[in-house]
Image (cartoon, helix red, strand yellow):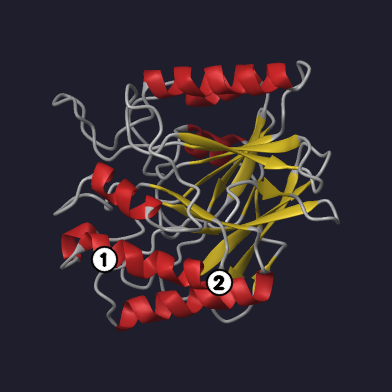
Amino acid sequence: MSKSLHFRQDGTFTIAQFTDLHWQNGESEDLRTAALIQQVIDAESPDLVVFTGDVIYSDGCTDPRQSFRDVVAIIERNGIPWAAVFGNHDTESLVTREELMQVQMEHEHCLSEAGPSDIAGEGNFVIQVQDAEGENPVATLYFLDSGSYSEIPEIEGYQWIQRNQIDWYVEQSKSITAANQGEPVPALAFFHIPLPEYKEVWKKETCYGSHHEKVCCPPINSGFFSAMLDMDDVVGTFCGHDHINDYWGTLHGIRLCYGRASGYHTYGKDGFRRGSRLIRLHKGERDFSTWIRLDNGTVIDEPKEHHPKG
């Protein structure tokens, strides 16, 4: 297949985000996850599928490589382009990120790339989406490996996006802006672990959706959000990691969005159904529309508002 992505003739481009599948060995919970994925694809016909980490729960997999293949086979059968970033549970046992990246790249419709070998993580890459005619890039998608756990003994908690990854993003953004006559191209960013600003936006701004657990962000703020502000291209970020949060809010012009946990082989909350976040870009707009589709077919396009406490 062509490795390029295009807006549709109606000026839209739709992404289905699946997150925290925690697939293991094809047990009954995994089959429910597979059914959800197919249901969303049938209902929404996305132009791209993005997995934002913890695609598999490697510690529970007999063969993590095969487990990952089993997940993405669903997308491959549908002939839809897809990309993935890694979470903290994808490579805890029996497999490395490098090996799982090789598994990704075996597949015809995969758009993931290993990315630069001289920066942190595996799978830092950029995809540009062309206009319907395939003549000009009109949207940019950044994918970053947010790591697993802190590698500094004195600091407990989750890993953070590293300085050399941020520098890489800045250089990519500068190059894309320069090629667009100095005008930033509207962009989205995908990673697994939420930034510290996800905690801040809930406290300070009106948010939309559910917040049922604490924001499990890194203990260190490495400055990725600040870099996005400086570059003025990213209009929305999308993460997973916290299975029973699905809210979004806008902080300094950037919409910080959680996905909706999609996997049944992991923790959840009674009454909080699994699902998928859909994202629709519109050509010529520095904005996007987003909604959630649940496993029972319900669409949440007007989530409940949360106002910060005065």
Rendered residue at 76%/16% (across/down):
182
The residue furthest front is 1
Choose between 134 and 173: the one closer to the eye. 134
Choose between 154 and 125: the one closer to the eye. 125
Instruction: Locate residue 256: give its quadrant.
Output: top right
**Residue that label 1 marks:** 66
Report the side of 99 relative to 300 (left or right): left
Name the secondary structure under disc 1: helix
Instruction: Locate residue 286: give its quadrant.
Output: top right
Which amino acid is tagged 2?
Asn
3D distance between C-alphas at marks 1 and 2: 19 Å
Position of residue 178 relative to residue 59, above or below, is above
Query: Taking the image as drawn, is residue 310 in sight?
Result: no
Rendered residue at 66%/48% (across/down):
5
**Residue that label 2 marks:** 78
Image quadrant in which the C terminus is located: top right
Graded by Cα atoms within 10 Å as few (under 14), some (14 to 19) or many (20 or more), the crowding at tag 2 reads few
Query: Taking the image as drawn, is residue 147 in sight?
Result: yes
Which amino acid is tagged 1?
Gln
Q: In the image, residue 219 lies at what x, y percent?
A: 32, 30
Looking at the rendered structure, the number of numbered marks drawn on it comes to 2
